[in-house]
Amino acid sequence: MSEPLRFDEVPAGQEATGRSPDGSGGEPEQVIVKVRRAGYVPAGFAVRSRVDELLFTADASEADLLAASVDPDVESVERARRLHLP
Amino acid sequence: MNVDLPPSETGGSLRDAYTFTPLTVAGGDEPVTMDVRLQRLVAWRQHGLPKPPTSSTAADEVAIIAKVSALTDFFALSEVTPGVEVGGIAADGTSIVTARIPVARLDRVRRHSSVLSLKAAQRLSRQLDATVRDVEALPGTTSVGTGGGHGVLVGIVDLGCDFAHDNFVDDAGHTRLVKLWDQNGRGRGEPGFEYGDVHLPAAIDAALATADPYATLRYTPGPEAHGTHVMDIAAGNGRGTGVPGVAPQADLLFVDVANSDIPWSGAEVVGTSFGDSVQLLEALVYVFQNAGDRPCVVNVSLGTNGGPHDGSTLVEQGIDRLLTQAPGRAVCIAASNSFADGIHAAGTVPSAGQHDLAWLTAPGDRTENELELWYPGGRRLTVELLTPSGQSVGLLPPGQSGTVSRGGRVVLFMANRLGDPNNGDNTIGLFLAPGVPPGRWVLRLWSTTGDDVPYHAWVERDDIGQSTFEEPLDNMHTIGSVSCGMRSIVVGSYDAHKAGAPLSWFSSAGPTRDGREKPEVSAPGHNVAAAASLTKDGTTRMSGSSMASPAVAGCIALLLAEAGASGRRLGVDEIRDIVIGSARSDPPPGPDWHDRYGAGRVSASGMLDRLRL
């Protein structure tokens, strides 16, 4: 990797996501979701299991995650974080 | 040195095909100078090939013979598991001794002032009863309640369950497992948890009656199953090994978060993660749902380094919610083993001027590297990233992100994100793909609001070529990223085999980033002998906060059983108060919370006495 490393140019209004430009992130992601209304499920999210009426795990596409990021009924979405054996 | 080499099979010269890579101390440039066979183990480990366990050594551990000038000093080292002294002290004051040492700590031990010579063998034996005795949970002791955890469900969320080990089978030959959920099985799970394979007691019992129960059940735990060892510490019945765990009469439920696709040896196994935070949370929901009204304590010996370390992640919030949904629930989590790994840094970016944070990635590292920096939501930082050659990748103002791509692949990603929805704080995240130049990366930080900006940063765990911050290191706040919840009980590790119960060299330190006292308590986690998978009745030794946490889980099972026998159902805050309030000191010194021992060393006897007050 001999070329100097510089941030890519990103079109105005678009946030760099860390996804490869070839769109290889097409698989649904496993996430943990916290909503503001009991029982609410953001569009496109498939509930996997529930802690309670406000917090659950789900599968969601990148497009659905993007929509959820501006959904006023969604407080937070957390992608799965890899774990290790201590 | 010139050597005449034969031509290679492809016609070229072997000189062209092979180039020496100098063997150096991990994280530095100094050459490794110890015994040749020990050097080879170090080289293997640095290239992702941990030493497998033997009958007398744990995984990634080597038996040695040493000549030392100060026997007591040598045996007092946390990394040293003493063996035997051979032939007494010589006229020159030296001793020949045997011991076992983690491969990762060989060079450090070799450089200790008491060590004159270190050579590569030997056996010793430690039993699980050392743990049970140390946590004051021996059956028959007057102050310890009867029942061994009877009526309590002990949940284990881990890797690899040897359901056929005799310690998990009762005297009638029936499994003690109420369920075994293999999250990575090919089946459809069960309603509400529709993935993986769920193995019920009838199927497990039928498998136990066959010549190859693993093939019959279509589930094999693997030869170094961490979860088997952990479960035995918490609640093994000793039927196979002769030594029961802390709560031998509890019922068991095991969730295997990763299994058949994980390689067991070779370069691929190092750096592999085991499960993820979504699987972990689903496992906990599953265990508590299956517990129903029954008292239930779950052990989680999983973790990672990154995250806000303030209990605000959704997985930690989820754990806290589960714990308050009903009485009779507890979750014990290993503190992590990152104390000496250089994975935490903290500082203050001045109101005027720049502040550099140096991050060292290892030469030859073939895995990705990741860093997270957290700072208060009301402040703002601009960050510039400098490569090891000093070149600027660019500046990111608050709220912006940047990528560097090569050939359609993102090789570097950095985000300067504002307002995390879980805690309102800001975070800078940096991800380096394999192949970017190794060395000293610098995050150059400026305050943009005219305030001093305090920060904490963590390097994500990487079992091959762990990246670190530059010295001097700050080893505080090194507890794991799922270990900071409000109501979990986090457990550090000490060595119960040595006088004075010294801390394990690896046991991570608190407090949380928001200043809460975690770990809560500590327990034996050093060279613990417990059930070995695929042996039917054998043991193996492992060390880690993973071994300490289930000891506390077992103690809590005893507490819950005793409470249940007297008609009491303890809420999580009551359980925490009892565990913390009954912890023993000396060590740690004094009554105050200690950043690695916690409130002190767990005591089952003390917990039951406190319950009966």
Image (tube, coloured by chain):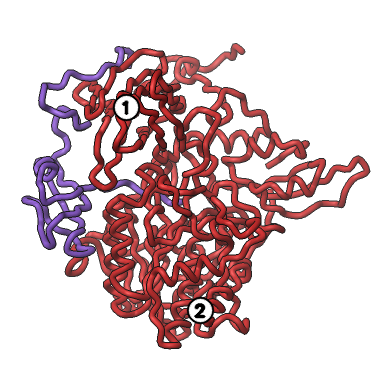
What residue is at 63 percent from the left and 56 percent from the top?
A: B588
Rendered image quadrant of residue B500: bottom right
Q: Residue furthest left?
A: A43
Q: Chain of mark 1?
A: B
* Relative height, residue B529 to residue B449 (above, below): below
Q: Residues within 10 Å of mark 2 (few under 14, many from 20)?
A: some
Label 2 sits on what residue type?
Answer: Leu
Residue B281 position, x and y percent, is 29, 59
Q: In the rendering, what colour is chain A?
A: purple
Q: Secondary structure at mark 1?
A: strand
Q: Nearer the viewer, residue B54 or B382?
A: B382
* Residue B80 relative to residue B339: left or right: right
Residue B536 position, x and y percent, is 49, 69
Q: Nearer the viewer, residue B520 or A24?
A: B520
Q: CA distance from mark 2 to mark 1?
A: 50 Å
Q: Chain of mark 2?
A: B
What residue did someone put label 2 on? B611
Label 1 sits on what residue type?
Answer: Leu
Q: In the rendering, what colour is chain B?
A: red
What residue did someone put label 1 on? B381
Q: Residue furthest bottom?
A: B566
Q: How many numbered badges does the structure rendering display?
A: 2
- On the same chain, marks 2 and 1? The answer is yes
Residue B154 position, x and y percent, is 40, 72
Residue B225 visible here? no
Q: Residue furthest front?
A: B450
